[in-house]
Every structure is written in structure tokens, then in C-alpha cells.
Amino acid sequence: MLVTPESNRRNQRQALAAAVLVAMGTGVWGWIAAPLWLLLALSPFTYWLLRRRTIRRLAVMQQPFPDAWEQILSTHVAFFVALDAGGKARFRQFVQIFLDEVRITGIRTELDDTVRVLVAASAVIPIFGFHDWDYHRLREVLIYPDAFDDDYQSAKGSDVAMLGMVGLHHLSGVMILSKPALLAGFAHPSGKQNVGVHEFAHLVEREADDYGLPPEVPWMAVRQWVRYVARELARPPAHHAHINRYTYTNSHEFFAVLAEYFFTSPDILKHKDPALYDMLRNMFHQDPGALLPALPARRHGLSRTAPCPCGSGTRYAPCCRSKTGPPASGSAP
């Protein structure tokens, strides 16, 4: 997603090579039929077409980072706060590019910078250890005012209450997140629940299946993970009491829930299951257990009587905390 000097040069070479091939092809056909020389105009167009995204990203990365966004990251995102100066600069650029390329739309709810930046942070955290990554599948994130059911309607009165999902079929390329659940996930840095990280972990898995693994992920780590998942899903979930039973729904939820656990409570996971922690560290090419303990003790979640972070003007307990409730399918319980 980020444009490095190396990736920029590689893109320039590829665009130039494609433009030259188009020009040569036009020259061959031009000798056969003179009017075909007009196709020579396709050569610079080809160059521009292959360069435009890189050029736009370079321009976005050079823009100043808004102060309001910086305040949101510093207040809500423990992962960002724990980074050094270079890591924070890189995280900011990820956020800028994500918000420039992915539309975030509120469905029957108002959006503000806090929601947008937290969606972007959710996308950045799982892929922060990769140097060459794009969310090819994702075009838009829909923010719902509450949990929803299989028909993407309010979950009130339904047996199914989802807090997030990566869309399928006609919603391919779309992610849906519950606004209260998104905010609550970043209001409790010591917990194991973060619906944004959970859903983007799902997307990372799908992207890896479709477009291949990032070069940072060693093949042996993937092989070890596949064997581990097969072995774990064949066992009763009770033997891992510290991991929610929902993890054992299927291999996809197993990955997403444990990724959520890995990034939100790495110290607990590292203590309870060092081998599992090491596998996830190799998969994501990150070590949040070494990163997050560097944070000073600064908060332990929102008080029940604190103003709700969604901006409703009411207390946290009767507002977003009550709305998140016990999660069900589509997000980590």
C-alpha cells in the first residue's frame, strides 16, 4: 500500500516497458495500414494508466496529517501510541492512503472523523508488518448504527446479531461494521474484542488466498499454522479455556478471532500459549507483545458513567456498551 523508492522505480520500469511494447506494436501494424499509426497515442496513455495509482499515493503520503486524526489515534489506538517515531509516521501514511482509496459510508447513522480513522486503524494494524500489501477486494466500508442480521437489517428481534462481516455475493468488495462495536473495541485496550481488527483479519486471509502471501511470511510458518488449525478444530474447545468457543466455528473464524486476540491482548496470549503466539508472530511479521507493554498504564476502559464515545451525549453504559451486548456470528464473541 505504501510507495517506497524501490516500489516506485519498479512501477516506473513496468509502465515504461508496457508503453514501449505498445509503441512497437503500433509501429508494426502501422506499416500494414497507415491509419493504425493513430494508435501510437495509446503508448503514453498506457504509461499513465500504470502509473496513476502510484503517483496519487505519493501525493497523498506527502500531505500533512490532520491534527484531528492525530488526536484520535493518540487517544484511542494503543497500537499507534506504542510505536516509535518512524513507526508512527508509517502508520499515518497507511491511514491517509486507506481513507483516500476506500469509501466509508454511514447507513442510518452519522459518521465523524473518529469512526473513519478507527476504521482505517483497524485496517492498518493486521498488515503493518507487511511492506507490499493492498486490500484488492475492498471498495467500501458500511457503518451500521447497531448489530444486524443476515438480511443486513437491524438485529432487534432476530436470533442472529452480527457486529461485522466481509460482504459476499452482491456485497462483494464491501465490509459492514457496527458503529457501537467499532468504538467499543478501541475503548477497551485491555480486552480481547475488536470487531474492526477481526473483520480485517478475515479480509487479510481472503486476500492471501487470492493474491498470494506477502514475502515476509515464511512458507514454513503457513504450513505449521495449517497443521495447527486442523489439529485444534478436531479437539474439544474446552481445552483452551482462555479462548472463546466461537473460535472453533471454522478455520476462518479460528484465524480471525486469534488474530484479534493477538493484537488486543498479546501479553495474555503469550503467557497462555507461547507456541501459538510465535506462530501468529511469524504469520503477521509483528510482535505486539514486545510493543504494547512499553505503554505506560494510562486507562482501563471507559467507566460506565463516562460520556459515550459515539457522541450521543448520554452515558456509556446505557448507550454503546449495552448495544454491543454478547456478540454472535460474524464477529468475535
Image: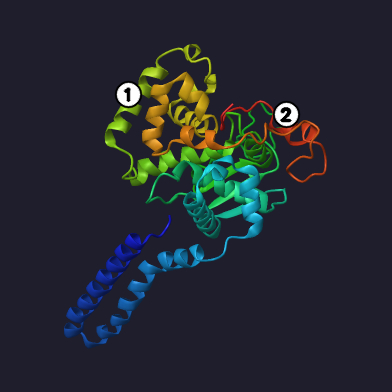
Identify the amino acid type marked 2. Answer: Gly
Query: Residue 24 at x, y = what percent?
Result: 20, 77
The residue beneath circle 1 is 227
Q: Nearer the viewer, residue 304 or 107?
A: 304
In percent of width and height, residue 330 lies at 56, 32
Is any atom of residue 247 visible in this view? yes
Residue 4 position (above or below residue 155):
below
Q: Are there few (<14), some (14-19), or many (20+) residues within 10 Å of tag 1? A: few
Query: Residue at the spot x=79%, y=40% of the render?
Result: 307
Question: In which quadrant will I find the C terminus?
Answer: top right
Image position, residue 292 (x, y; %) = 53, 36
Residue 21 to residue 286: above or below: below
The quarter of the displayed image where residue 313 is located:
top right
Disc 2: which residue: 157
Residue at disc 2, secondary structure: loop
**Quarter holding residue 221:** top left
At x 35%, y 47%, the residue is 211
- Kind of residue at disc 1: Arg
Residue drawn at (79%, 44%) of the image: 312
